[in-house]
Image: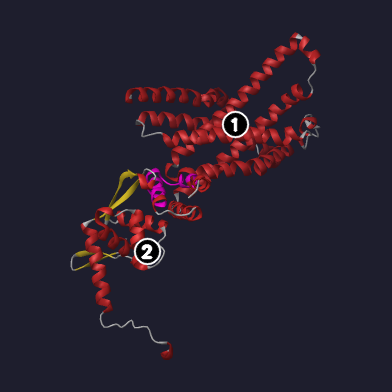
Amino acid sequence: MRSTKHHNVVLIMLGEFEYLILSAAVRLQENAYGAAIRQEIETASKRRCSIGALYTTLDRLENKGLIKTAMGDPTPQRGGRPKRMVRVTGKGVQAASEFYATVTRVSRGVSWAVPGRNEL
Amino acid sequence: MNRFWWWVVEPVSRLLEQDEQEAVLGDVVESCQNGPGALLDVLDVVIRRQACLWMGWRPWLILFGLTLPLGMLLSILSRQTSDGSAVYLWMYASNWDAALTQNPGFWHLFAETAVSVFISYLTLACLSWTGGFVLGSLSRAMSALNSILLCLILFFGEIVGAPSYSAFLHRGLFADLHVPDSNAAVFAVSFYRVVLPVIVQILLVAIPALWGYQIAMGMGKLRRVVSAGIWATAIATLAVVCIPEVGLWFFMAMHIFHISAPVGIWAGIRALQYLRPLEFWPIVFLIAHAITQRGMRRARA
């Protein structure tokens, strides 16, 4: 776990994918589980989200104490199989908020305008 | 996803822990993946999970310290058992003469042989079960992958390991004595040389070993005393079998390198014969296990 002490507060450094999962889980609230989080990430990032990466990252986040997971009830549209429900903890909210603040701070004054073909 | 793909995807998903298997298969069903897509998704999770497990030292220790030697030992014992029984099978099945049945001595010898072959087969099955049980108890987290590895080692043990060991042993024991192979006629028949060892390896080694593995995997947390008793018996059983094999290596070393071992070692190895009934402990264990399971089912009902 990458962590750093800053002003007596332990900050947990998140990866980009970890941040995407935390954001998706917070947005989905009670409906946050594997397939829904994957769908949310694919829609937002317009990239394919690997289910293997999703599940291993969920484990990592849980080990860091940033989320809690639990098996939900079986549903018919899943062939009677349960969902792995995800809930973001207070520590997870704090870590995601810090990540967002860091990205915002570091991006201040930076222009990401893609140069036109003639300028290349 | 059609039935065929489901039939492919479902066994692959068994490599995952039960809760995760349910969650992943549920996600696959919900996202309406086509067959190959679902298979790739499940494989993706399985490969990442196994890769995480194999990052530590424990799976490697189990592979090289237990699965590999156990697979080779069982392959060698399987070949010895099948070769031993092949001689009797050849005598009775390939050289059957109805006139022999009129001889009362024939039936006496036949019964004695049948019991001896049956006991050797039962011993091999019990040993394989014990090996699978020990492996299953040690590697619960690695679940099905270890059973696949055991099967692969048994396959290579049967194809390469056991024949090389037999040839080496034969050279070590008989080469200097210039004794003709009295069983050459038996092993000239391809059934006894090739088919019977494979049948014995599958029926008396692979299936009992996987059965023992499954039982160990499915067992809940046992009381410490029971668990220690089971472990002590299983380890003693394997030791009773392994140590005389080590003795065999000593014997070969003496003939090849002319190294003599202290007399006490041979006396100790011979004394292990008295512990051989331990090899049949799986029968007692399975009966006790079946009774306990029945009692628990009744209690639940």
- Residue under numbered circle 1: B204
Q: How is the image coloured?
A: secondary structure
Identity, as a three-letter code, of the amino acid under mark 1: Leu
Instruction: Work out whether B135 lies above or below B92.
Output: below
- Judge whether residue B252 can be spotted in this image: yes
Determine if marks 2 and 1 fall on one subunit: no
Assign the C terminus of chain B to one quadrant of the image: top left
- Residue under numbered circle 2: A42
Q: Residues within 10 Å of mark 1 (few under 14, many from 20)?
A: many
Q: Position of residue B145 (x, y in %)?
A: 50, 46
Please name whichever residue, B169 or B128, is drawn nearer the observer in this view of the structure.
B128
Looking at the rendering, which quadrant does residue A46 occupy? bottom left
Q: Residue visible at 61% across and 22% down?
A: B119
Please name whichever residue, B159 or B176, is drawn nearer the observer in this view of the structure.
B159
**What span is colored magenta in the figure?**
B10-28
Viewed as shown, does residue A93 lie left or right of B209?
left
Which numbered mark, 2 or 1, is in the foreground of this view? 2
